[in-house]
């Protein structure tokens, strides 16, 4: 294990922000990670754990240790007539795992095609898209407890998954490093094609009885048409979460803003698309310095090249303030700001 000094984090975050970490280490085995936790006393250090770096906005040089998790491997660990349990190490690229499942004709991950990032980051915020979330197929994960270096198992319920939420963003924050995640995939599943954009794409292609591959291809086509590729235009996917507001607040807002979309959550809450709010406030496609809200999806803030983390953070604050002034709705970042 080599600990490097003063390393640029630009290659390790999809916003492409050029800040330096005082120390940097890449981890390629669980044992190495356990040594880092115990012998190198990781719990006492200021630290930043990197998977794919696709959900982070770096606003300044980091005067602690950046730990890049590079654990690799995808294996089938159990199977029966109906299900297959697939274990992926946390440093695997998320989309590679999805393709592995799709190529084997196993149901459950196809709607989550092309989400940037690594497997280990997926449970942190219960990644989701087009009507699926990882909680739907998640069986368990193994994490190293940073303080002791011991391996700990988390079941689905122990992860306390919610909309872009898990225990790893709350009680368990900064206490564990995820090393592997096991998914229970189905051999005889049902495809989830209820999301409007998927239905429309399949219909346009004349596909009536879609296969897993068809749904995955449709999701990839939708994402490519709306979401910028971080390799070309730095971004971190949705910058904000979609806010949930009380039903009566939504009804009052509808009187003044009749076109406001909203999706029921339970019986008394409504989820309002943050992208709509940001677009209505005039930010969609608007460039401010080296940053802006993307022209096809206002929820995605982009780095046109050379933006600092603070420039993007200022834009985010300006967007939050304008949305609040206009609608009285507080939108909160989905991305971790460091
Ligand atoms: N909308 C606009 N203008 C925009 C963007 C969206 O008016 O610029 C409105 C439209 O009413 C549209 C609705 O928002 O019908 C929903 O838009 P979309 O289907 O693009 O989904 P989203 O709510 O903006 C969420 C996730 C995405 C995920 C998509 C598809 C969050 C924060 N984001 O976006 O996740 O891909 O649904 O399921 O929940 C991510 O987390 O990084 C991400 C990309």
Image (tube, grey):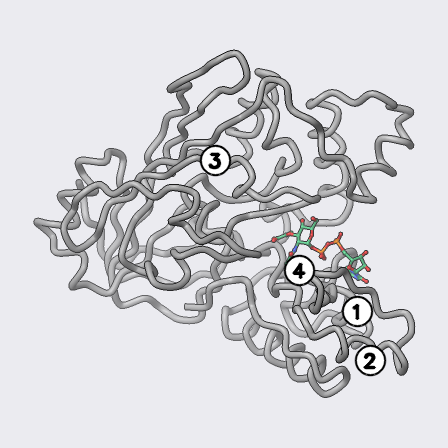
Mark identifier at residue 253: 2
Earlier sequence position, callout 2 versus callout 4: 2
Residue at the far front: name it.
Answer: 267
Q: CA distance from mark 3 to mark 4?
A: 21 Å
Q: Which residue is mark 3?
A: 93
Closer to viewer: mark 2 or mark 4: 2
When the figure is inspected, residue 70 is found, relative to residue 51, above or below; the finding is above
Q: CA distance from mark 4 to mark 1?
A: 11 Å
Which residue corresponds to mark 1?
279
Who's the residue at 34% across and 63% down the image?
171
Mark 4 within 8 Å of ligand 1, using the beta carbon = yes
**Residue, x 40% and y 46% (percent of image)?**
51
Separation of residues labelled 3 and 1 (CA atoms):
31 Å
Q: Is residue 208 left or right of residue 168?
A: right
Give me the disc on residue 300: 4
Q: Looking at the figure, which quarter contains the N terminus?
A: top left
Q: Can you give x and y, in whole percent of width and height, for residue 240 in the image?
A: 61, 65
Q: Quadrant of residue 186?
A: top right
Disc number lying in front (1 or 2): 2
| Side of 5 where 230 appears, left or right | right
Mark 1 CB near ligand 1 (8 Å cut)? yes
Q: Are marks 2 and 4 in contact (CB under 8 Å)?
A: no
């Amino acid at each position: 294990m080599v600990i490097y000094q003063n390393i640029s984090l630009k290659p390790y975050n999809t916003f492409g922000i050029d800040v330096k970490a005082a120390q940097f280490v890449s981890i390629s085995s669980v044992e190495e990670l356990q040594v880092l936790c115990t012998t190198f006393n990781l719990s006492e250090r200021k630290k930043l754990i990197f998977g794919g770096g696709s959900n982070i906005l770096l606003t300044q040089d980091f005067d602690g240790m950046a730990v890049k998790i590079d654990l690799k491997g995808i294996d089938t660990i159990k199977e029966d007539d109906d299900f297959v349990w697939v274990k992926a190490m946390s440093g695997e690229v998320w989309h590679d795992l999805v393709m592995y499942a799709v190529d084997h004709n196993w149901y459950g991950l196809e709607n989550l095609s092309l989400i940037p990032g690594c497997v280990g980051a997926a449970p942190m915020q219960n990644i989701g898209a087009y009507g699926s979330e990882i909680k739907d197929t998640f069986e368990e994960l193994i994490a190293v407890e940073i303080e002791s270096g011991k391996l700990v198992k988390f079941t689905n319920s122990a992860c306390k998954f919610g909309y872009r939420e898990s225990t790893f963003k709350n009680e368990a924050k900064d206490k564990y490093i995820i090393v592997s995640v096991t998914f229970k995939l189905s051999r005889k599943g049902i495809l989830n094609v209820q999301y409007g954009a998927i239905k429309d794409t399949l219909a346009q292609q004349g596909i009536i009885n879609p296969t897993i591959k068809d749904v995955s291809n449709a999701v990839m086509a939708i994402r490519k048409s709306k979401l910028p590729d971080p390799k070309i235009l730095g971004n971190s996917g949705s910058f904000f979460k979609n806010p949930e507001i009380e039903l009566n607040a939504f009804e009052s807002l509808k009187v003044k803003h009749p076109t406001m979309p909203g999706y029921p959550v339970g019986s008394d809450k409504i989820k309002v698309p943050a992208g709509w709010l940001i677009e209505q406030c005039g930010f969609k496609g608007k460039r401010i310095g080296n940053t802006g809200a993307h022209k096809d999806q206002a929820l995605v803030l982009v780095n046109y090249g050379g933006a600092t983390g603070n420039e993007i953070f200022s834009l985010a604050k300006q967007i939050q303030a304008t949305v609040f002034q206009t609608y009285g709705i507080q939108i909160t970042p989905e991305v971790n700001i460091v």
